[in-house]
Image (spheres, rainbow, N blue to C red):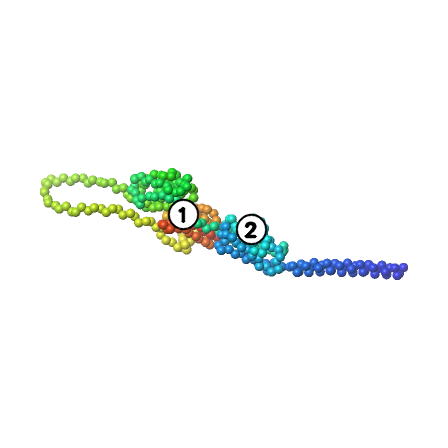
Amino acid sequence: MKTSDTSQNTFIDKSIIMFFIVTIFITATVFAFKYANYTPCEIIDFDINAKNYRVGEIIRFKDNTDGAFKREWNFGDSSKVRSGLSPFHTYEKAGKYNIALKVNGNCERIKTIVIKEKVFILDSTKLAKFKIPSSIKVGEPLRIKDQTKDAYRWEWRFGETAEVNSTKKNPRYTYESPGLKTITLVVNDDTRYATRKKINVLPNKKKTTSPIRRRRIPRPTITTRPPIKVAPDEEDPKEFRAPNIKDSDFAIKIMAVADKKASAKDFGPYLCNNLQLPINARGKRTTFIDFCNKIKGKNIKIKELEIFRNKNNNCIEYITIQYSRTGLF
């Protein structure tokens, strides 16, 4: 009986030993596999290459991580997850995007990029076209004919009020006050292709007659008539040009508006008094006067400013501005 008990204990001890040996072998194998394919998350790196980082531009992404065999790219715009070493991608909207790269299914790194609005390129063939005389007198009717191709809707402003004065193709207008006026035409509701021209409105002086003085004793006198001077033809006023202003000085003026030290009216000479000028502020369409009212009293920092001017009269026609808010609002 003694010998039988000893044999049974020896058999059990060997089974336990074999169990531990197998378990250690499996654990070591799994650890070795994970170690061979382990990529520290802190060394994940990738490049983002683009020229301007704008809407519609092709942007290239490239993974630089050593030992990577599986990659998952998330471009942050709800598009499909991509794979590959160096994919390409384009964005359809301006904004801030978080680019996430997951390597080998374990580690992930995120980089943030800012995509700006697509640069507006003016198509001169779409500009509103009309002709006006260089000057006209108060009270005289002004008749204008639109010559814009494919125009089907019109908004005329004749410079005496901020409102639309006519929506006809060939309007008629009579000025009530003298001065240099700006005539603006917007066709098909596209303010980017508005055309502005200057007209000099002259005062309409009425001839007055002085009373005749009678002399009690008329005395004949011999006088010589001075030569009759023919008044020269009234010269056409010089073509109007808006004053020049550097982009940096324009940005300083905008900051002055934010500090309540200036207003939208101070920009009138550069905008040819068109305070309803369309602009793009932080990716949103608005007007210049609404933009000034929005930033008044705010702490802002201008990151980028682009100004588009009319080559003929130097008037600012379109503005793109990127800015950030600082402090408490």
Q: Secondary structure at mark 2?
A: loop
Relative side of 165 to 301, left or right: left
Q: Which mark is residue 76?
A: 2
Give the residue drawn at x 35%, y 52%: 243
Relative side of 216 to 68, left or right: left
Disc with the residue nearer the chain's start (1 vs 2): 2
Q: Across the whole image, how many numbered discs are drawn on residues? A: 2
From where the camera sits, is residue 241 visible? yes
Q: Position of residue 30 (x, y in %)?
A: 70, 58
Q: Secondary structure at mark 1?
A: helix
Residue holding disc 1:
124
Where does the N terminus fall, quadrant-wise?
Answer: bottom right
Identity of the amino acid at label 2?
A: Gly
Relative side of 176 to 229, left or right: right
Q: Could you classify mark 1 by the number of other residues whose Cα lies within 10 Å: few (under 14), some (14-19), or many (20 or more)?
A: few
Give the residue drawn at x 37%, y 48%: 272
